[in-house]
Image (spheres, rainbow, N blue to C red):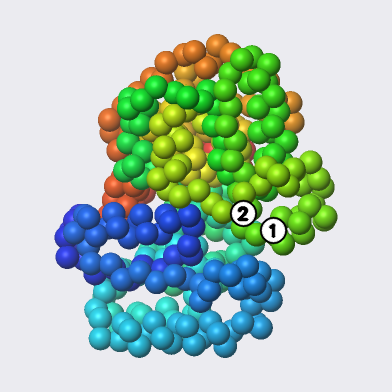
Amino acid sequence: MESKSFRDKKILFLSVKLFNYENIIADKLRSLGAVVDYYDERPSNSIFTKGIIRLKRSLYNIKISNYYNDILKNIENEKYDYFFLIKGEVVPQYFIDKVKSLSPNIVLLYYTFDSFENNPNGINILKNFDRKYTFDPKDSKVYDLSFRPLFFSDDYYMLGKESKAKYDLLFIGTAHSDRYIISETASKWCEENKLKNFAFYYSPSRIVFLFFKLFDSSFKKFKYSKISFFSLKHEQIIELYKQSRVILDINHPNQRGLTMRVFEALGSGKKLITTNVDIKRYPFYNENNIYIIDRNNINLNHTFFDLPFIEINEKLYHKMSISGWLEELFFDHQSFDWLKEYDNI
């Protein structure tokens, strides 16, 4: 029987870089007693590399092979209990085969916090994994994966109790789709209702932003002066959460899975305004804490800002944490029903 403990478990962990979450996950596993070898899934995180991997991966295959051969040299004498892969955008099949041959008893674990629409490699390698999870309820049915939403890290633990709010509404996010229009509409409403608003829009580069500005109609209204080309540090985001009463979450129109912002907001004891109507199906949904807006017809309610945050019950709150997330992925798979009936996917 598999031990439900991370103590002395050896884990080979590969993930794309995403605002330091890969390091937060690796560090949490280590704090729970695991021995973790982490490698970036991509050979490079330059704009060029990310673009060519998504658009014409074959032109970059030699670089990918050299990178993964170097990893194999580093781990050739290691015996792992788990291979934990997040997203699977780049990792080649031969690498997975070699990892399995080096550690015959290894458990292969896959998770994705992105849809498969732009990640065909993820679909191609699913067959290798013993346990497969996605944050997207639709993809879980289409590709026969277990459904498991995201988490909040320990730094967000009940921040609402720590300080008085400076901002009534906070939005932090990467510039895409209709986010700017929705956030600026909310900002204007706050101004009209004498509430303080803070919004931070991030783009990975000026070239990327200007490209979308030219060819994506949803970017036409984005003001260049309001875009930052440097992401906020984790500590800066935590400080902004401490200073805010309500967090605004604007999911991508094509994604139904809940964003990390949802869990960070609720985990920190902050109220949430979101465009994702599917949140009604989750066990932590509470009208007192969560207000849903129609992205095409935005109506906000001043009363919502004045309602106190109702604490989530302890068991569910733990499930929403990074510890609960890791425990479910590694040991308690399919032990918790995260959604009510999902008949309309």
- For the point 55% across and 27% down, the residue is 169
Amino acid type of the residue tagged 2 in the rendering: Phe
- Can you give x and y, in whole percent of width and height, for residue 206 in the image? 69, 58
Residue 18 appears in the figure? yes
Q: Nearer the viewer, residue 6 or 266?
A: 266
- Can you give x and y, in whole percent of width and height, for residue 318 in the image? 30, 38
Look at the picture and state if 262 lies above or below 310. Answer: below
Check disc 2 and report the residue beneath it. Answer: 229
Residue 141 appears in the figure? no
Q: Is 211 on the left or on the right of 342, as rendered?
A: right
Look at the picture and state if 196 lies above or below 121. Answer: above
Amino acid type of the residue tagged 1 in the rendering: Arg
Snapshot quadrant of residue 309: top left
- For the point 77% across and 47% down, the residue is 219
Check disc 1 and report the residue beneath it. Answer: 206
Q: Nearer the viewer, residue 324 or 229?
A: 229
**Distance between the alpha carbons at the discs numbered 2 and 1:** 7 Å
Location of the C terminus by quadrant is top right
Q: Is 300 on the left or on the right of 214, as rendered?
A: left
- For the point 54% across and 52% down, the residue is 231
- For the point 57% across and 88% down, the residue is 62
Q: What element carries label 1?
A: helix
Q: Is mark 2 on a helix, strand or loop?
A: loop
Q: Which of marks 2 and 1 is nearer the N terminus?
A: 1
- Can you give x and y, in whole percent of width and height, for residue 153 in the image? 36, 45
